Amino acid sequence: MTGAALAVILGSAGLTAVGAPAAYAATPSDEVAKLPISSFGALVVDDAHERVYVTDARKTSGASQVWVYNFEGQRVGSLATDQPASGMALSADGATLNVSVSNRIVTFDTATQTKSGASYTPYDVECGRDVAVAGGKTWFTETPYTSSYCDRTDNAAYLYGVKDTSFVSTGWNSEGRLKLAAGPGAPDRLVMGQAGAGSAANAFLTTFDASGETLVRGPQRRFADAEGKGALDLKDIALSADGKRIAVADAAYGTRLLDASDLADAPAGYQPLPEGAKASAVAFSGDGTYVARGAAAAGSVSDLLIQPADPADGATPIEFAFEGELDGSRIVPRGLGWAKDGSRLFAVASDGGTSHWLHVIKPPAAQYDARFTGALSTTPTKPMVGEPLGIRGRLELDGPAPAEPVKVAAVRKDADGTTEVASAKVAADGSFTVLDVPDRLGEATYTLRFLGDVTHRPAEDVTVTVDVAKATTAIELTAPADATRAGGVDITGKLTGQGRALPSGIALKVTRTDRLGTTGELTSAPVAADGSFRIRDLPSKKGRTVYAVSYEGDALHAGSSAEATVRVTG
């Protein structure tokens, strides 16, 4: 891996890099590519030509394509197919890309980017295939169309091989779906696992020797204990660069590291994924240096960990959290691939729906800690609905100063749910102010997050809870000091309010108290659109007279009142 900083090379992003307990966000210079796919099919990295291939696993029929990117994350073309493409695999020499479409395995010359051949297969309508190359031959899985739900636990699943322009049955089959993996470290080994078999099934993992004309099964393993607990929930399989280890992304367990010779647990395994993260992908770098572990996780919990491939190394993983509308929120199953020299990791993230992004990551050599220090404060101390609220705090960063200003993200949780608040830049001294305009009364909790930058790990989230009150109103009165009973009293005024606009049709209560202490209610004063009003009165008694004007308030505004004293003469 090169450099002391992480680079996400591709479009605009909120990628996050992390350290031990959390995850971090990308800087404004990070880039991410928005993929033109609605459902992820497969990812293949072609080192010889520095290309990345991505397919869309959409279920509709008709023409499709394999999307082609360079190692800088720029889309450089596509390979046209007449049917939807799903699984892919490179030949051992990297000269041929094998692409599964609905009724064929199509091959493309990776140097010329042109179609070079095809082998017919059983017709796949809905479910797509896994493809792998082992023993110099191409293998693929098949889940025959039995329903519109491909992951039904009773769906039959088969393993086939490609021979010339057709296919051959291997005789191996199961229920659910099958996933395949192979790698250059053990070129004759094919790994197959059972996925989509449901939580009640005790899914298997097995290996085959693919060096001969027919597959010879090696060790196999099921993972549930005597009570049926611990069953495999398979999302991805990866072979180490030397072929001695097999890593499995198990959504029910985490990342399993197995001895390839017998599928027993390796003497040392990887540390657990962060709490709340479910394993979705795993990949070893071709130079044997790194392993990347992908996950689906909410909020600032890490979705991606990069660390030494040897768990005995003990180095703290570099962690990443994907969070936001510009880079996805999780790593998709089987969505990781390395450049052979470990200089780049390619990761596909999704928002959990139909949007997908391709990240190109250069892992940094080191990351430093970050933390929020001191208590958060708010301005004003008593927030009001519809009025700006500032949340002030301080972020402390270890190590070198960031190349560009970092940001603190925030969300507000109130009775209406959770709302994302605009991020705030952190000043050179670590201070920041998150600004929001609360739009409902009652308790609101703000969670502040630093998701990291290229050299800093994320900080532990901090929260502050406020009670949002009604916005204040005020009444201003302009009244004469003296008036006569005959001429009457003429008072003007204005009603103003903070926050949201005052409702229309307001009528103010008006009372008059004479020198004897007798109080009477006068005709209410209507308020114009600009807040102005006028009060006219013919007092019956001479002497000191007090006029009181009040507004009872509304759903978002507190009430207010004002008084004016007039000396009434003959």
Image: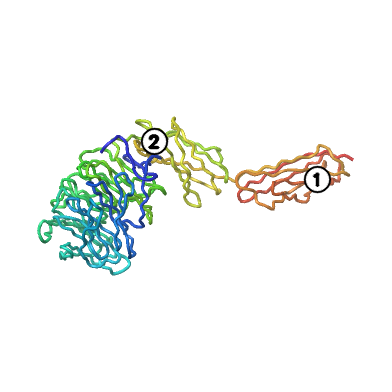
The amino acid pointed to by label 1 is Thr
The amino acid pointed to by label 2 is Arg
Q: Position of residue 37 (x, y in %)?
A: 35, 56
Q: Residues within 10 Å of mark 2 (few under 14, many from 20)?
A: some
In the image, taking residue 513 as reference, residue 140 lies left or right, namely left
> Which tag is nearer the camera, tag 1 or tag 2?
2
Looking at the image, can residue 224 be seen? no
Nearer the observer, 88 or 568: 88
Above or below, 470 relative to 144:
above
Q: Mark 1 or mark 2: which comes first in sequence? A: 2
- Asked if the residues shown at circle 1 and circle 2 are in contact, with their CB atoms under 8 angstroms apart, the answer is no
The circle on residue 319 is: none
Looking at the image, can residue 71 be seen? yes
Identify the element where label 2 is drawn: strand
| Residue lying at the far right of the rendered structure | 570
Q: Position of residue 170 (x, y in %)?
A: 15, 64
Q: Position of residue 410 (x, y in %)?
A: 45, 43
Above or below, 294 relative to 161:
above
Q: Residues within 10 Å of mark 1 (few under 14, many from 20)?
A: few
Q: Which residue is mark 2?
A: 371
Identify the element where label 1 is drawn: loop
| Residue lying at the far bottom of the rendered structure | 146
**The C terminus - image quarter:** top right
In the image, taking residue 180 as reference, residue 422 lies left or right, namely right
Above or below, 259 relative to 64:
above
**Which quadrant would residue 267 be assigned to in this image?**
top left
Q: Position of residue 569 (x, y in %)?
A: 87, 39
The circle on residue 518 is: 1
In the image, taking residue 311 as reference, residue 68 lies left or right, namely right
Nearer the observer, 280 or 255: 280
**The N terminus - image quarter:** top left
